[in-house]
Amino acid sequence: MSATFSKNDTQNMVIALKLASQGKYGVKSNPMVGCVIVKHTKIIAKGYHQTFGKAHGEINALQQINHQAQGATFYVTLEPCSHQGKTPSCAQAIIHSGVKKVIIAMLDPNPLVNGKGVVMLENAGIEVKIGLLENDALTLNQGFIKYMKTNKPFVRCKIAMSLDGKTSMSSGESKWITSEVTRLDVQKLRANHQAIMTGSGTIINDNPLMTVRLDNINLTPLRVVIDSKNQITNTSLNIFNADAPTLILNPTNTKTLSSGKLDLGNVLTQLGNQGINNVLLEAGPKLIGSMIKSNLIDEFIIYMAPILMGSNANSMLNLVIKNMAHKIKLNIVDVRMVSNDIKITATLK
Ligand code: AOF
Ligand code: ZN
């Protein structure tokens, strides 16, 4: 039977989730985790995981009350860790603080923890309830969860297109399809990813920077270029500037091959092994086609501008689909306006 929660419980977990999201620019491959400690219906401490390798959310909250939480209820967005990692076990710290009850949004998919944190708490006589606002917690840490379950990062594919589904003119020209406001939205999207991935075609045609350029935010996601034909030779291209690190993957410099060709699944596993949990794919129709074919895209963000680009223009996808039986089905999960453009969030069915 699933646990039941009060309105107060929900309110406290909403606060914990909001706190967690404040860690988004600092936690890198770790999960965002937030928590609140409540005594006699009053919040006595709040915390979140701020920086990769530093104190977990639970410890940041416990520190505020000198690790004294006798009889309190602890709300946390992820199961407290049972293991000694870069930092000591949070479940242990919670037990020592005298907490009476722990309410958890979701279990930790990390095999080092997965359920063991709950067992530790319960063995110490603490009441544990799991599953409050679980879907929100799952959405918050999509990248961390995907990596823990598959060793591959979560891949979000961003596309800017016209209302007739075109992404560039036949000459390659594509500046600009969407509005300036939308382009700022894309900058914010980049800031939420650890890597920005593209293909050699986009690099050669557009010479993009592929960096995050937002006021007061200093983030340098890894620029990853899939260069399956060794075409990137010009070292004065913008991606080679000092603003962010760049990784060019071609058949001569990588171990991610299968039968002599770059294997995109292996590329993602390699990125996952480097501590990258989420990737923003900003590529042309060829690479998007290959990524779809290999079933490597988790989510699309499509910005659709109120323009028509005509029949000579290139479409978002270079992938031949012969008949309707083979059409690729998507689930639209969100639609909203960004200035005059439509922003569609969709997942593969
Ligand atoms: C976090 N922050 O607030 C919580 C985490 O390498 P460590 O010692 O930092 O441990 C990382 C693991 O700890 C992480 O993969 C997750 O399973 C668990 N919980 N991690 O970074 C937190 N509560
Ligand atoms: Zn922990």
Image (spheres, rainbow, N blue to C red):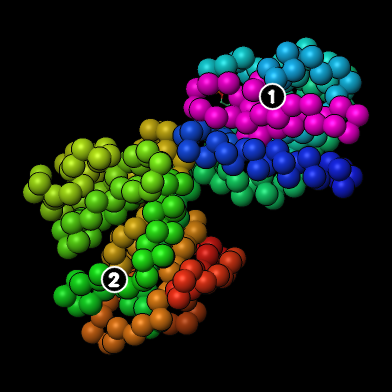
Q: Residue at x 41, y 65 (%)?
A: 182
Q: Residues within 10 Å of mark 1 (few under 14, many from 20)?
A: many
Measured from the top left, where is residue 145 in percent x and y? 57, 41
Quarter of the image containing the N terminus?
top right
Task: State yes or no: residue 50 in magenta.
Answer: yes
Task: Say which mark, if any, is on residue 176.
Answer: 2
Q: Would you place residue 257 above or below residue 34 in this image?
A: below
Q: Would you place residue 294 above or below residue 77 in this image?
A: below
Cβ–Cβ under 8 Å for marks 2 and 1: no
Task: Say which mark, if any, is on residue 61.
Answer: 1
**Alpha carbon distance from label 2 to label 1:** 46 Å
Q: Which residues are magenta?
A: 33-61
Q: Residue at x 16, y 75 (%)?
A: 171
Q: Quadrant of ligand 1?
A: top right
- The amino acid on which the numbered mark 1 sits, given as a three-letter code, is Ala
Measured from the top left, where is residue 292 in percent x and y? 41, 62
Q: Residue at x 13, y 53 (%)?
A: 231
